[in-house]
Structure formats: structure tokens, C-alpha cells
Image (tube, rainbow, N blue to C red):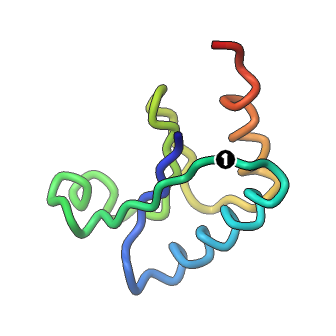
């Protein structure tokens, strides 16, 4: 599972969502979208870094900017790993 960290009224977050949607058409992946505004700890940690996509199991993060190719390559590292 992956989490896209962002917030409402964030232009870059909207762009990141579009990238995620495009990649999901090529590589089906579960991505939860979390609004950091709902948690003070997340605002403190990510407030100046969003959007960020995080692999929930490993904690690995990919920060903006990323395009479809970069995101797909990054996701594939986790999706194709044997458990």
C-alpha cells in the first residue's frame, strides 16, 4: 500500500494526483490519499515537502517533483519484490 500525502488547495498535490492516476492505468496499485491538514504531526513533517508518496511498509518516500516514468520505476521496486 502507498500513501500520497498532500492537502486541499495545493496545486502541486493536484498535479501529483494526476500522475498517480496515469500510472495506475499502467500499473494497478493501491494508493491512499491522506490530507496532512488533519494531523499536526504530518503538517510539521511534510508541510513544506508535499506532495510526497510513501510506501507504507518500508517507509520509503518519493518527493515531488516526479513524473509518470519516475513514479512507475519507483513503485515497481516495491511491487515486484518477492515477499
Locate residue 19, reporting x and y percent: 70, 66
Q: Which residue is most to the left?
A: 40
Mark 1 Cα-neighbour bin, 10 Å: few <14, some 14–19, many ≥20:
some
Q: How many marks?
A: 1
Locate residue 8, reporting x and y percent: 38, 80
Placement of 19 over or under 60, stated as above or below = below
Residue placed at 51% from the left, 73% from the top? Answer: 13
On screen, residue 41 versus residue 28, left or right, reads left
Placement of 56 over or under 18, stated as above or below = above
Residue placed at 59% from the left, 70% from the top? Answer: 17
Q: Please tell me which residue lies in front, 7 or 25.
A: 25
Residue placed at 21% from the left, 56% from the top? Answer: 44
Placement of 56 over or under 28, stated as above or below = above
On screen, residue 70 versus residue 33, left or right, reads right
Q: Quadrant of the C terminus?
A: top right
Placement of 27 over or under 50, stated as above or below = above
Image quarter of residue 5: bottom left
Q: Secondary structure at mark 1?
A: loop
On screen, residue 44 versus residue 28, left or right, reads left
Give the residue at mark 1. Answer: 29
Locate residue 48, reporting x and y percent: 36, 64
Residue placed at 45% from the left, 61% from the top? Answer: 33
Locate residue 68, reporting x and y percent: 78, 59
Q: Please tell me which residue lies in front, 50 or 7.
A: 7
Amino acid at each position: 500500500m502507498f500513501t500520497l500525502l498532500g492537502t486541499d488547495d495545493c496545486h502541486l498535490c493536484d498535479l501529483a494526483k494526476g500522475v498517480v492516476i496515469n500510472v495506475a492505468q499502467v500499473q494497478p496499485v493501491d494508493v491512499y490519499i491522506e490530507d496532512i491538514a488533519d494531523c499536526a504531526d504530518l503538517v510539521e513533517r511534510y508541510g513544506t515537502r508535499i506532495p510526497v508518496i510513501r510506501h507504507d511498509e518500508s517507509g520509503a518516500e518519493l518527493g515531488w517533483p516526479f513524473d509518470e516514468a519516475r513514479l512507475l520505476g519507483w513503485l515497481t521496486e516495491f511491487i515486484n519484490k518477492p515477499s
